[in-house]
Amino acid sequence: MRKCVLSLAWLAIALPVFCQNITTVEEDLKKLRKKRVTNYIVTGSLVMLAGAADGVNQALQFQYPGFKKVFPNANDQFWKPSLSGANKYKNGDPHQGARFPGSRTWLVFTTDGYHLTRFADHLFLSGAIAFKIAGHEKKKWYVYVAEAAGYWLINRAGFCMTYNRFKCYP
């Protein structure tokens, strides 16, 4: 009888502790799911913006009339590649040297639309990679391959959304 009472007392003490651990595990799983979803949303958004910047870049290069149709007030001196390349030089003349320190190297993205969109593409992709790595979650190798393929598709969707908008067909 004494064993039975002690067993019931032990059970009465242990059961709430056990149930509390289950609740904690459920809360932890909920937090992990939320963290994963946030990571996917932020990373996917940055990858799509990188693709969009790439699409604008290629539209500037190969579909400038379409770009101008969508943005009629765009400054040709900044956005049109055949004109804007001279922006990095003093008075537009390569023989006079750089327009300002860094205009031909690390600050070239401030001189024309082509380099600005390349910079944005690289910046968004770098941000996406950094954010993904910050997730600190170990996964099986094939999950990384699947995620990379998915992000590549999102990137190309961003590209198509912008590039196809500027296409000029006869």
Image (spheres, rainbow, N blue to C red):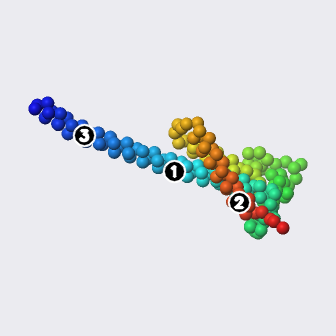
Residue 38 badge: 1
Residue 88 appears in the rendering: yes
Q: Is residue 130 left or right of residue 103?
A: left
The type of residue carrying mark 2 is: Thr
Residue 126, placed above or below residue 116: above
The type of residue carrying mark 3 is: Leu
Residue 15 badge: 3
Residue placed most toward the observer, 36 or 71: 36
- Percent position (x, y) of residue 49? 65, 54
Q: Which residue is mark 2?
A: 162
Of label 3 and label 2, which has the lower sequence position?
A: 3
Dot 3 crowding, Cα within 10 Å, few <14, some 14–19, many 20+: few
Residue at image coords 11%, 31%: 2
Q: Quadrant of the C terminus?
A: bottom right
How far, Cα to Cα, is label 3 from label 1? 35 Å
Residue 110 appears in the rendering: no
Of label 3 and label 1, which has the lower sequence position?
A: 3
Residue placed most toward the observer, 110 or 16: 16
- Percent position (x, y) of residue 46? 62, 51
Residue at image coords 75%, 55%: 57
Q: Count the marks: how many?
A: 3
Dot 1 crowding, Cα within 10 Å, few <14, some 14–19, many 20+: few
Q: Is residue 42 left or right of residue 74?
A: left
How far, Cα to Cα, is label 2 from label 1? 25 Å
- Tell me the SS state at disc 2: helix
Q: Residue furthest right?
A: 95
Classify residue 70 by image quadrant. Answer: bottom right
